[in-house]
Image (cartoon, rainbow, N blue to C red):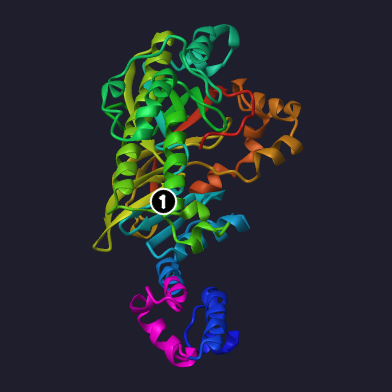
Amino acid sequence: MNKKQLLGLGVPEDCIPTAISIVQIAARNKSIEAPKKLIPKLVTAPAVYAADPIYGPLATAIIEHAANDVPFSEIDYASWGTDFDDNSIRQIRNACKLPVSRAAALMPDAHSGYGLPIGGVLATENAIIPYGVGVDIACRMKMTITDLPVETVHNNDASQCQELDQALETGTLFGTGRKWKRPNDHAVLDEDWTITAVTREARDRARGQLGTSGSGNHFVEWGVLTLPAPEFGLEPGKYVALLSHSGSRGPGAMTCNRYTDIARRMAPAKIKNDSQLRHLCWLDMDTQEGQEYWLAMNLMGRFASANHEVIHRNVTRLAGAQSLATIENHHNFAWQEEHNGQSLYVHRKGATPAGAGEVGVIPGNMADSCFVVRGKGNAASLNSASHGAGRRMSRTKAKQQFIWKEWQKHLDQKNVRLLSGGLDEVPGAYKNIHDVMAAQTDLVDVIGEFMPRIVMMCGDGSRPED
């Protein structure tokens, strides 16, 4: 019997080599039931023949094939904007093929990532994708509106802003792996970090990195917030505000990598062996591993929030500022929510929650507007919006294409002082934030606009942790 005949009998293609070798054995042993008669029965009920001395290997192969056979059926996704690279489209479409996927959306800041694109939103049933959450779990924005006089940063004269500069330079640390010699204290470190093996291992690193800012697109900056109407118990007007972007640092990366490895070991071969899908391996929430990741992810979320709290506490204290109000929102997370009458896990990989009335911050770049927004609760976007402007080119390309002289002039014209930062983070590496906001007017309302004045980022241009 040949391959075509065996396929006609219902043998899966990846089991054909095993079937051919068994047919050859049967041909030499006339006492064995003819393969042409027996194989259709075996294909229908392989477990019955699993212990058969001749046909057992084929039965086992068919059983394993069935276990690894993933029922792909692509769902639709909604999108906002049109400025997407080809790989982002490919990635969201791959995510929509997963058997656990139920709904998806692409935000206007979308660009290529790992597994899900940055700016991708995916709702799954009873499953979480560690890389769909991301490496920097619960990366977030936090803004503290202060009582500092606006005149402090109006002219942005370095000689008159020394206290604000020093507050940024000494109130946090930038760089991959950076940690404090004298760690900060916070109640999050008193929580139970033994809930999983990886969180137990990560606690010491978390202690040293609490209050640090990482690298890549993470920043801490002073700027001016304009509120056109009363908000947050404040009168309309201009306020000096502190804005930060960072997440769960090394502990978040440890958690993502550990559970991604576990998800791949548990995944069907058809997915884990596919270079386009291997970052989309999921954890079933009915398993111990799925529940462990859920606990670890949520702890990383609380740690990331504490990280910002410490940064803002340190920097405002050093600047002699008092907090009038705070705004905080996060991305790179999975939320358990109800959509279309189903309980789903909504992954927002670089996307901001934008439920009705939900307040968040959407930054642009080191020199352009950042917007304080209120969500409209658009069901088609799974109550989501962009988390920023989104990159329009890779870090490598930005370093090759741009020079500092050009962008220093741009920053001067914008009245922005950059204390440190990589060439891969200059405004030209990003999409136009105003175009991004124009593409999502049905997702959020703008309630405030923040303009950066004194910006601090990591100066080494290293790969970001998110």
Question: Which SS class for mark 1?
Answer: loop
- The kind of secondary structure the magenta stretch mainly shows is helix
Looking at the image, residue 82 sits to the left or right of residue 141; the answer is right
The image quadrant where one finds the N terminus is: bottom right
On the image, which quarter does residue 242 sit in? top left
Task: Give percent across and percent down for residue 129.
Answer: 41, 51
Task: Tell me which amino acid carries mark 1.
Answer: Ile
Task: Give percent across and percent down for residue 267.
Answer: 43, 57
In the image, which residues are magenta?
31-60
Looking at this view, is 46 or 461 the one in front? 46
On the image, which quarter does residue 367 sit in? top right
Task: Give percent across and percent down for residue 427.
Answer: 63, 35
The vertical placement of 161 against 272, above or below, is above
Q: Residue at x 46, y 44 (%)?
A: 350
Residue 235 visible in the current orientation = yes
Residue 380 in magenta stretch: no
Q: Which residue is mark 1?
A: 129
The vertical placement of 40 against 155, above or below, is below
The vertical placement of 261 against 58, above or below, is above
Task: Give percent across and percent down for residue 218.
Answer: 52, 30
Residue 59 in magenta stretch: yes
Q: Residue at x 56, y 16 (%)?
A: 155
Looking at the image, residue 84 sits to the left or right of residue 72; the answer is right
Q: Residue at x 49, y 49 (%)?
A: 119
Q: Give the class, few, some or many, for how many residues have Cα within 10 Å of label 1's Cα (few <14, many ≥20).
A: many
Looking at this view, is 21 or 397 the one in front? 21
Residue 383 visible in the current orientation = no
